[in-house]
Amino acid sequence: MINSKIAYLLNPYELIYQDKIIDDDSLESGFILCETLVSVVSPGTEIAAYTGVPPLRPGNAYPRLVGYCNVARVIKVGTNVSSVSEGDRVLTGSCHCSHFLIPESDIFAVVPDAVESQHAACAYLFHLGYDTVIKSGISYGSSVVVLGLGVLGLGAVAMSSRAGANVYAVSDYSTPNEIAKTFGAKRVFSRAKFADLKNLLGDRLSDVVISTSNSWLDWDFALQIAGRNSFIGVIGFPGRGLNSPKNNPLDSQYFYDKQLHIQAVGHAPVENDARQFLKFNQKDNLSFILSEIEAGYLNPDLLISGVFSWDKLEDAYNGLIERVDSPITYALEWKK
C-alpha cells in the first residue's frame, strides 16, 4: 500500500494535503502507478483558485485539486501497457501529489533522458504559446505583440521567436522584461510607453497579438495594436475578477473595421486521429517541445524562480502573490 499526499484547496486560502491509499498490488489493466518527481506551479490558474477569483465555469469551485504540470517516474505498470516501462519518466497533467494512478492513454509524453525533470515539467507552459503560433499562422517575419509577461506571456514570446517572428512585448516589470529579451523579444515596452510601440510598428501595426492578462486596459491595447485582418490570440481571461469595462471590448472601429480574428488559444486535440489529420495535437506538440528543450533551444530555467519542497506549496503561492523580485513560477520537489 502507498500513502499518496494530494494538495487540495478546500476554500480560498485553505490548502491541505489529503492522504489517499493506493493499492499497488491490484493495478488495473492499462493503468500505470507513478511517483511524482517535480511539479511546477501554473501561476494564473492556481493563484486565481487560491485567492478565490471567480471560477471560469459555473458550478462549485471548491474543494478542488490544484496543479497540472507534473513529471513523475513510473514505478509499476499494469497489463496491456506498451508505451512506457518501469523507471521511465513521464510528463502528465496530474495535480500536485506524491503518487498517482493514470491510464496509459493520459500520459502526455515520455521525458528524454537528457532533459531535467524540472525543465520537462515546464513543457505545458510553453505549449500554450506554441498552440497560439499554430492557430494564428505566425511565420518567419510576422510581427507579434505579447501583452503581459507572466509565465504564459514568456512562453508565448519564446515560441513566437522560435517561429521566426519579430516579437515585441508589453510589461511593467523589469525581471520578466529581461527574460523576454533572452527568449528573443526585440524590445519590451512599459504600458506608459505603448504609443512608442505603435509608432515603431507603423501603419501595418501587428500581425498577431497575444493577450495573456485579465486587464481591460491590456484588452484595449490589443484592439489598438492589431493590424487589419490580424489575429488576437487570447491565453488570458479578459475581465476575470474585474468590473465591467468602460470601453466596448468589441468596439467596431477596431473589431469590425479591421476585420479582426479573435480566438481563445491553448487547447489542442489530445492526439492524432487514425488518418493523421490532427498532426498538431497536444501529445505530439509536447514531445516536440521536449525535443526543443533537449536541443537547448528553450531554456525553462528562465521560468523557474526557485524550488520549494512539496509541503511548502503555500509558501510558493504567497511568493507569487507578493511578487517580491517578480518571480515567474516555482517548482515543487517531491522526490530527490
Image (cartoon, helix red, strand yellow):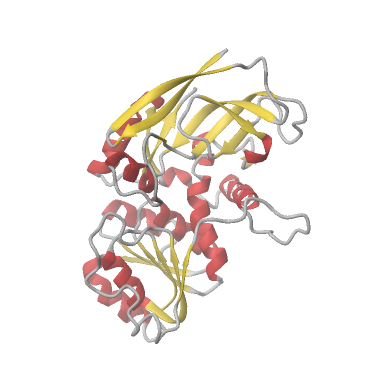
The quarter holding residue 65 reads top left
Q: Residue at x 35, y 56 (%)?
A: 149
Q: Is residue 279 above or below residue 64?
A: below
Q: Is residue 2 above or below residue 135?
A: above
Q: Is residue 257 left or right of residue 174?
A: right
Q: Is residue 296 above or below residue 15?
A: below
Residue sitting farthest toward the front: 59
Inspect this view and state whether residue 163 appears: no
Quarter of the figure that contains the N terminus: top right
Q: Is residue 248 above or below residue 54?
A: below
The quarter holding residue 241 reads bottom left
Q: Is residue 272 left or right of residue 60?
A: right
Q: Is residue 25 left or right of residue 335?
A: right
Q: Residue at x 29, y 42 (%)?
A: 320
Q: Residue at x 25, y 58 (%)?
A: 242
Inspect this view and state whether residue 56 appears: yes
Q: Nearer the viewer, residue 288 or 49?
A: 49
The percent position of residue 117, horizontal first and vertical second, equals 53, 34
The percent position of residue 160, horizontal first and vertical second, equals 50, 63
The percent position of residue 28, horizontal first and vertical second, equals 69, 25
Q: Residue at x 39, y 87 (%)?
A: 257
The quarter holding residue 238 reads bottom left
The percent position of residue 46, horizontal first and vertical second, equals 37, 42
